[in-house]
Image: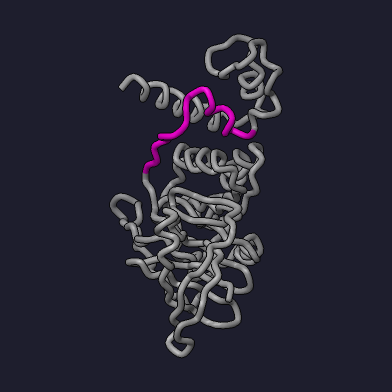
Amino acid sequence: MKGKIIKGVGGFYYVNVIHDKLYECKAKGIFRNRNIKPLVGDDVDIEIIDRENAVGNIVSILPRYSELIRPAAANVDQAVILFAAASPKPNLNLLDRFLILMEKRRLETVICFNKADLIPEDELEALCGIYRRAGYPIYSISLKTGQGTEELKGVFKDKTTVLAGPSGVGKSSLMNFMKPEAGCEVGAVSEKIKRGRHTTRHSELMYIEGNTYIMDTPGFSSLYITDIEEKELKDYFREFAEYEGTCRFQGCIHINEPECAVKAAVGDGRISEERYLNYKRIYEEIKDRRKW
């Protein structure tokens, strides 16, 4: 019988079998002997030991088509990065860091701004335009009013999605919208610091329907880029790609070089200045890190 691991706790793996039930399983010793650890998101074959009490064993792990390290998960199709348009004000440097990590992992990424009802339409459009020009699909929603939520719902259909973003932006509220009966804990946003409490504590897939699964992740207020060298950083800003090879110098880093096509594109508005400035800041951070 085939299923998908949606949670792993203390050596037990909870396997969702569509049109059946959730089984509590242990992994056979063969996996330990081969140093293979089942991951949340793995598609597996299980044998049923006790159908009434929903107990079984994992007997094989089917081939993975993707694997994430943080959060540890397999067979993820896409990431939805959720930020608030306001309250808290979006930290675009942090958003760009999320995007860099997803680009590094070659994961399809959708950006969603919640609380769209809290800012004027022209400000919202300017915010969305930064990332639309970079080539990302953008959704603006309000989980409070329902604005844009049905359109966003279609993004998740029949996919396994990692939901990422900082605290206090509505990730748990979005999970509750997708599956109201799940009753996720919604973290209250501190009025003093405008930042949510960390309410998500472990990797777990929520089964929605059909082949639709969503994984919430802990909220981050900062994110350090640790596994990227400064010279490769430009490869993870997708709007730079069309200018590759058109700068004066081969291997241009787009920082101090003259006759740089990327800097020219920033100058005339084809590339967002906000994105470019964050690129420079993160580049310097990575460069300085090597001196430590």
Q: Nearer the viewer, residue 134 or 90?
A: 134
The outermost residue toward the bottom is: 52
Q: Residue at left 64%, top 44%?
A: 136
Q: Is residue 122 above or below residue 271?
A: below
Picture colour scheme: one colour
Q: How many marks?
A: 0
Q: Residue at left 52%, top 38%?
A: 100
Q: Is residue 64 above or below residue 251?
A: below
Task: Check residue 231 for magenta coloring.
Answer: yes
Q: Residue 66 at what x, y percent from top left?
A: 57, 51
Quadrant location of the N terminus in the rendered image: bottom right
Q: Nearer the viewer, residue 217 or 198?
A: 217
Q: Is residue 117 visible?
A: yes
Q: Is residue 47 above or below residue 230?
A: below
Q: Residue 49 at what x, y percent from top left?
A: 46, 83
State left or right for residue 9 relative to residue 61.
left
Quadrant location of the C terminus in the rendered image: top left
Q: Residue 290 at what x, y percent from top left?
A: 37, 22
Q: Residue 90 at what x, y percent from top left?
A: 46, 45
State left or right for residue 53 relative to residue 67.
left
Q: Residue at left 44%, top 52%?
A: 71
Instruction: Give the image quarter of residue 232.
Output: top right
State left or right for residue 223 relative to residue 245.
left
Task: Check residue 105 for magenta coloring.
Answer: no
Range of magenta residues: 222-238
Q: Is residue 140 visible?
A: no
Q: Residue at left 40%, top 26%?
A: 285
